[in-house]
Amino acid sequence: MNFWRVIDEHVQNSKEEKQTKDIVDTMMNIMQSGEAEFEFDRRHVKAILLDLLIASIDTSATSIDWIFSELLRHPNIMKKLQKELEQVVGMNRMVEESDLEKLEYLDMIIKEGFRLHPIAPLLIPRESMEDCIIDGFNIPRGSRILVNTWAIGRDSEVWPEPEKFMPERFIGSDIDLRGHDFQLLPFSSGRRRCPGLQLGLTVVRLVIAQLVHCFDWKLPNDMMPNDLDMTEKFSLVVSRAQHLMAIPTYRLHV
């Protein structure tokens, strides 16, 4: 992607009245106002755009990898999702973005995947603004705080049988993954939550739906679902230690 061209296009269109503005418009307004408390020019806008692009690609791809791995390990759950897709979408076309809001079981699977396999296990550090006591612990003002979403997702006091992949645990639950409920924080919460939340969530849901709807899947070399290696590899994101391999068979009537 040519970031310089993106920036130039926003500069040229800055005189036009837009109903909605994106993050590039916001950064260009900050740069042009000169009100930033530090040096802020086109180089910094480009660097931020690059960070956003890399972060969105890596995290979405890794999320899809983990959730699809769990579906391969639980063929009964994949069959149940395929049945929902058949009822909502039909067998004569692919899934469209407009279908996603109707796929309740897919939504449960995505939530369960984010709970069990958070891509960023430690959220961006926060700093306490004042002295406080939380659960009997003294937190001095100015303390750096790391929120462990991996541990939250496996807390047996919050999640029954936390090590099991059970999308049905969200039946009748109003727990949301957009940062409103602290039991599930895949995108963090508050003013510093992930700016790509809606895009990332849409991409993950749509790709998983397409993979499951368009194909039947089996593991290679007569491997059984329980034999699938789910070892984690810690880096900027927590990804699979071993690449996922599966064999597709087309199933639609298109």
Image: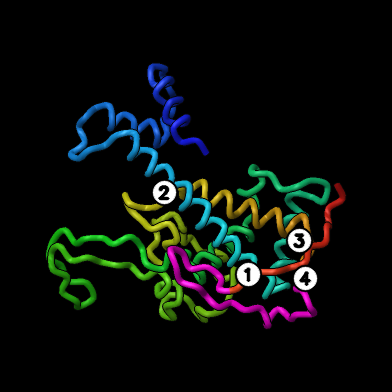
Q: Which residue is mark 4?
A: 218
Task: Using the numbered discs, state the Cα–Cα distance from disc 1 to disc 2 in whole angstroms.
Answer: 24 Å
In the picture, measured across the screen, residue 136 lies left or right of residue 24, that is left
Q: Residue at x 42, y 75 (%)?
A: 158
Q: Which residue is mark 3?
A: 83
Say which label, 1 or 4, has the lower sequence index: 4
Q: Which residues are magenta?
A: 219-241
Say which label, 4 or 2, has the lower sequence index: 2
Task: Using the numbered discs, state the Cα–Cα distance from disc 1 to disc 4 in whole angstroms.
Answer: 15 Å
Going by the numbered disc 4, the residue's amino acid type is: Lys
Going by the numbered disc 2, the residue's amino acid type is: Asp
Going by the numbered disc 1, the residue's amino acid type is: His
Mark 4 closeness class: few <14, some 14–19, many ≥20 residues within 10 Å: some
Q: Which residue is mark 1?
A: 243
The mark closer to the camera, 1 or 4, is 1
Residue 126 x %, y %: 26, 60
| Above or below 33: residue 176 | below
Task: Using the numbered discs, state the Cα–Cα distance from disc 3 to disc 1 in whole angstroms.
Answer: 28 Å
Q: How many marks?
A: 4
| Mark identifier at residue 137 | none
